[in-house]
Image: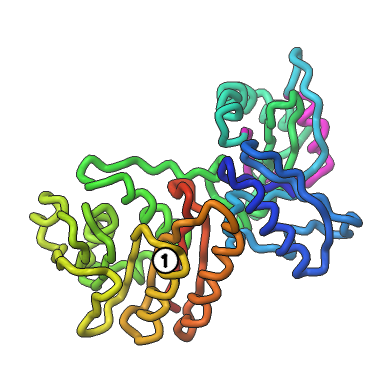
Amino acid sequence: MLLYCRPGFEKDCAAEITDACAAIGVAGYCDARPGQAFVTFHALPVPARPLIADLRWSRLVFARQLLALGPAVALPAADRATPIAETVVGLAPGFSDVWLEHPDSNDGRALSRLCRALRTPVLKALAERGVATDVTDAPRLHVFLDGSGDARVGLADPRNSAPWPLAIPRLRLPRAAPSRSTLKLDEALQTFLGATERERLLRPGMRAVDLGAAPGGWSWQLARRGLRVTAVDNGPMDPRLMAEGLVEHVRADGFRYRVGRPVDWLVCDMVEQPHRIAALVAGWLRRGDCHGAVCNLKLPMKRRHSAVREALARLEAALPPSARLGCKQLYHDREEVTAAVVPG
C-alpha cells in the first residue's frame, strides 16, 4: 500500500498502518523515510486480496491518502506516457479518473509541473489502448512520481479514499475571515460530514459554542453558515465579526464555561495538551451539553501516535448514541490533528 502523509509524520503514519493491519491479522513492514511525505507498507506474506478492501481510509488519522500499490514504472525521458499506459492496461477494465501526483514535500513539489505536463499524454496513451478513464464506480488510477525517476502506480476506491488530488482540498481564505484557522474548521466540516449531513446538521439558527475563540476564525466559519455562536475567550474578537450580530462574546475560561441549555455544536481550538482537550469535550458530551463537536488536538513532540489513541479513547467512551467519531490530520493542521463527533 501507498499512503500519503504530512512531511515529518512518516513514523506516525507507519505506526498507525502497522497497527491497523495487525488488527486484521496482517503482518508487514514499512518504508517511512523522514521528510518524504509518504509511506509504503509491504505485507508479509502478500495477501490474496488487496489490503485496502479491509481498511477504512476514514479511520486512519495520519494517512492523507490510501492506495493499493501496483508496480513501479521506469520513465525514459523520451516517452514517459507509453510505459505508464502499458503497465496499467491489465490493472482494471477502466478507471473513474486518472490523477498524476507527487509528494507534498519541498522536493516533491518540484515535480508538479511534470505531473501537469504528463496528464494529457497519459490519457491519450490509455485511450489508444482502449482504456476508459470515466467509468462510474471504477477504481481511480494514481500515477505517483516520487522523485526517483520512476512512477508508482496505485489504485484507489473513490468511496474509501480522499476525494481531492494530492489529498489536498483547495480552500481559499476569505477576506472577511478573522484568521487562517478558519480553514481548519472548513476542511474538517467537509471531511467529516457529507454534503447532505452538512445541510442537516449546520442549519441557520442552530446554536454553537466556540471555546478559545479569539480572534474568531472558527466562530466566523459557523456564523457564515447561519449558526448563532457563543465565542468563549478572554482575548479580543474581530470587530467585523462581532458587528454581524450572530456571535456573542463571553470573556471566560474555556475549561470552566458551562451552558444553560444544550447546544448543537461545540468547537474548540485551544493550545493545550491533547488529553486535557479530550477530557473537556468528553465532559460536554457526557452531560448532554452538546450534540456534536469538533476539536483540535495539539500533539507532543514524541509519542504522537499513542497520544492520539489515548485522546480518542476518552472521546469514544463519551459518544452519544448513534454518533460517530472521526479524526484526521487535515491538510491545514500542523503539529496537530482534528477530531469530530458527528451526531446521528
Place of residue 210 in the rendered image (x, y in percent of width and height, measured from the top left): 27, 65
Amino acid type shown at disc 1: Thr
Residues shaded magenta: 81-102
Q: How is the image coloured?
A: rainbow
User: x%, y% of residue 100?
Assistant: 63, 33
In front: 141, or 182? 182
Q: How many marks?
A: 1
Give the left or right position of residue 272, taking residue 113 as reference.
Answer: left
Q: Residue at coordinates 61% horizontally, 52% vertically from top-left? A: 63
Residue at 69%, 27% in the rendered image: 147
| Residue closest to the eye, 2 or 94 | 2
> Relative to 302, is 192 above or below?
below
The residue singled out by tag 1 in the image is 196
Q: Nearer the viewer, residue 119 or 177?
A: 177
Is residue 93 visible in the rendered image? The answer is no
Residue 97 is inside the magenta segment: yes
Residue drawn at x 82%, y 50% as measured from the top left? 42
**Position of residue 263 measured from the top left corner of the image (x, y, whole percent):** 27, 78
Residue 157 x, y percent position in the rendering? 67, 54
Q: Nearer the viewer, residue 342 or 11?
A: 11
